[in-house]
């Protein structure tokens, strides 16, 4: 199988599996699934693989989850819903359970 196609399929599968918590916290489930798959594909294409270094690959992915949450959950999803981004301390505090 083509190496790039294999990485894309693995990224899509990983993104699909990891999108479950996102789906549970969003109103638009289909968008959350699609976003999870897309982010998984982009991550596997953007970063090179290191054989047998699974923890080393998981830590940057987990660390990138916080900025992704801010960008998607606090800014982008409200804009697509026709609302203003939720950037004040109180508004972000109300969204924080989605992050955990």
Image: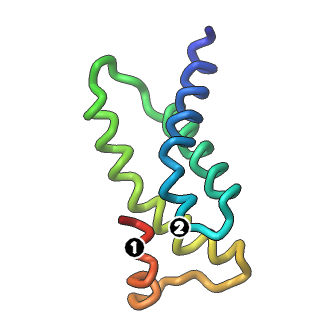
Q: Nearer the viewer, residue 90 or 23?
A: 23
Q: Position of residue 70 (x, y in %)?
A: 47, 68
- Indicate whether 92 appears above or below 53: below
How many numbered marks appear?
A: 2
Q: Percent x, y for residue 55?
A: 26, 34
State which quadrant residue 12 falls in: top right
Q: Residue at x 59, y 67 (%)?
A: 26
Q: Residues within 10 Å of mark 1 (few under 14, many from 20)?
A: few
Instruction: Name the residue tied to disc 1.
Output: 97
77 relative to 40 in the view: left or right = right
User: Do tag 1 and tag 2 residues touch (Cβ < 8 Å)?
Assistant: yes
Residue 44 vs residue 63: left or right?
right
Identified at 48% across, 83% down, the residue is: 87
Q: Quadrant of residue 92?
A: bottom left
Callout 2: few (<14), some (14-19), or many (20+) C-alpha neighbours within 10 Å? some
| Residue to which mark 2 is pinned | 25
* Disc 1 element: helix
Please provide percent x and percent y for residue 54: 30, 29
Q: Is residue 18 above or below residue 72?
A: above
The residue under the point 57% across, 73% down is: 75
As drawn, the label of residue 9 is none
Residue at 41% across / 91% down in the picture?
90
Q: Marks 1 and 2, Cα distance to the nearest angstrom? A: 9 Å
Q: Quadrant of the C terminus?
A: bottom left
Is the residue 47 above or below the residue 34 in the image?
Answer: above
- What colouring style does the render use? rainbow
Q: Earlier in the sequence, mark 1 or mark 2?
A: 2
| Image coordinates for residue 14, horizontal then vertical, percent | 50, 36
Question: For the N terminus, which image quadrant?
Answer: top right
Q: Secondary structure at mark 2?
A: helix
């Amino acid at each position: 199988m083509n190496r790039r196609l294999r990485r894309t399929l693995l990224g899509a599968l990983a993104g699909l599996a990891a999108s479950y918590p996102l789906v549970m916290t969003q109103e638009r489930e289909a968008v959350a699934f699609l976003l999870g798959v897309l982010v998984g594909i982009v991550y596997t294409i953007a970063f090179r693989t290191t054989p047998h270094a699974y923890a080393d690959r998981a830590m940057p992915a987990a660390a990138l989850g916080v900025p992704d949450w801010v960008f998607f959950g606090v800014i982008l999803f409200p804009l697509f819903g026709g609302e203003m981004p939720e950037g004040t301390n109180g508004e972000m505090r109300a969204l924080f359970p989605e992050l955990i």
